[in-house]
Image (cartoon, grey):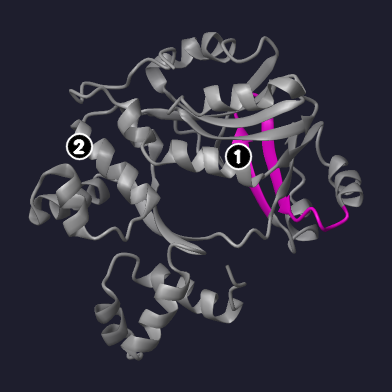
């Protein structure tokens, strides 16, 4: 695969950020740009370096977000990885080494099953720690919904998460429904606040490492000091903050670790590996439809997997 021309890719990202689901002909007409130029760029990059994905408000459907650090012996990494990726409540898992050697994992857990988290994690390791993660800045809102839709909506959410530009005709075929029904279902997910927005996601393998740190207090000057890096901040209620810096292994890791360690109490390095990316992607394709009971009556137990 040839390397992308970043100016072309950035142009396409900007266009799809404004028109995430519209047809190329409609976009070209609205923007006053040449349709064939747009189609050439789209065919060159979409599905290879760029996709549009639905971003969900998981609180609305009763899911709590947790980050977990799991100790796993090095010779058991792949075995545990395959078991983790059979669990649809896993959002992603990557190898990580630091204050825990094994995995960093993001789980989405039904609000009503919080008491089962320890029992679930003990199936993978007897040495773990986990923290609930909220958006920074933390609003203090502790109102969680529950699943209240049919199973077909879970299938639709999987499709839109994987590729929100999947043709309506294809979605209708997969769900055995009419095109107007699919449009109604998508509009309902948006109107009820389950779909936050549609986001263009770029995958050009720029970042293959991350430094994850846990801090009891947040020194906001770090956001300005390291603004040249991609840094995300999360709130860990009852503990403090989650800080994550993404970078390339081609950079000087030692100096970064030394520099970042002054701002956190706990630290580890996460490896964003192509093998694990494939495992994570395979789990992502149908995770919502595997979470939900086929009769749509709610979530399956997190202990089933």
Labelled disc at residue 276: 1
Indicate the position of residue 5 as horizontal and vertical percent values: 59, 78
Indicate the position of residue 127 as horizontal and vertical percent values: 70, 13
Labelled disc at residue 152: 2
6 or 30, nearer to the observer = 6
Closer to the eye: label 2 or 1: 1
Q: Secondary structure at mark 2?
A: helix
The quadrant of the rendering that contains the N terminus is: bottom right
List the single residue furthest toward the front.
1
Is residue 239 visible to the viewer in this orientation of the structure? no
Query: Which residue sits at x=26%, y=73%?
Result: 23
Q: Classify 13 as above or below 123.
A: below
**Neighbours of disc 2 within 10 Å: few (<14), some (14-19), many (20+):** some
Q: Classify 223 as above or below 266.
A: below
The boundaries of the magenta stretch are 231-252
Q: Say whether disc 2 or disc 1 marks the residue closer to the N-terminus.
A: 2
Indicate the position of residue 97 as horizontal and vertical percent values: 78, 32
The quadrant of the rendering that contains the C terminus is: top left
Q: Is residue 247 magenta?
A: yes
Query: Which residue sits at x=47%, y=71%?
Result: 45
Q: Classify 200 as above or below 120.
A: below
Indicate the position of residue 174 as horizontal and vertical percent values: 19, 46
Q: Using the rendered view, name the quadrant where residue 235 is placed.
A: top right
Q: Secondary structure at mark 1?
A: helix
Is residue 32 visible to the viewer in this orientation of the structure? yes
**Neighbours of disc 1 within 10 Å: few (<14), some (14-19), many (20+):** some
The reply to whether discs 2 and 1 touch (Cβ–Cβ < 8 Å) is no
Query: Which residue sits at x=38%, y=58%?
Result: 198
Mark 2 vs mark 1, CA separation in Å = 28 Å
10 or 244, nearer to the observer = 10
293 or 2, nearer to the observer = 2
């Amino acid at each position: 695969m040839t390397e992308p021309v970043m100016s072309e890719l950035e142009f396409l990202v900007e266009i799809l950020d404004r028109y995430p689901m519209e047809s190329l002909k409609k976009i070209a007409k609205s923007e006053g740009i040449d349709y064939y130029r747009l189609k050439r760029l789209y065919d060159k990059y979409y599905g290879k370096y760029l996709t549009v994905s639905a971003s969900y408000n998981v609180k609305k459907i009763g899911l709590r977000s947790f980050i977990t650090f799991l100790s796993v012996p090095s010779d058991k990494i792949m075995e545990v990885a395959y078991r983790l990726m059979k669990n649809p409540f896993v959002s992603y898992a990557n190898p990580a080494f630091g204050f825990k050697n094994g995995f960093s994992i993001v789980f989405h857990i039904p609000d009503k099953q919080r008491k089962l988290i320890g029992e679930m994690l003990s199936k993978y390791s007897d040495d773990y720690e986990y923290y609930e993660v909220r958006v920074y800045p933390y609003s203090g809102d502790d109102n969680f919904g529950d699943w209240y839709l049919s199973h077909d909506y879970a299938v639709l959410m999987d499709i839109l998460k994987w590729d929100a530009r999947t043709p309506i005709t294809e979605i209708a075929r997969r769900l055995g429904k009419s095109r107007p029904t699919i449009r109604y279902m998508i509009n309902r997910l948006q109107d009820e606040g389950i779909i936050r927005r549609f986001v263009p996601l770029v995958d050009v393998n720029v970042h293959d490492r991350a430094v994850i740190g846990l801090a009891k207090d947040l020194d906001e000057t770090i956001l300005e000091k390291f603004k040249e890096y991609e840094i995300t901040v999360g709130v860990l209620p009852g503990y403090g903050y989650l800080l994550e810096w993404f970078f390339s292994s081609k950079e000087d890791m030692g100096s970064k670790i030394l520099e970042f360690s002054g701002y956190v109490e706990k630290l580890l390095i996460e490896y964003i590996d192509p093998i694990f990316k494939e495992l994570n992607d395979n789990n992502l394709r149908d995770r919502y439809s595997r979470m939900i009971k086929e009769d749509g009556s709610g979530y399956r137990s997190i202990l089933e997997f």
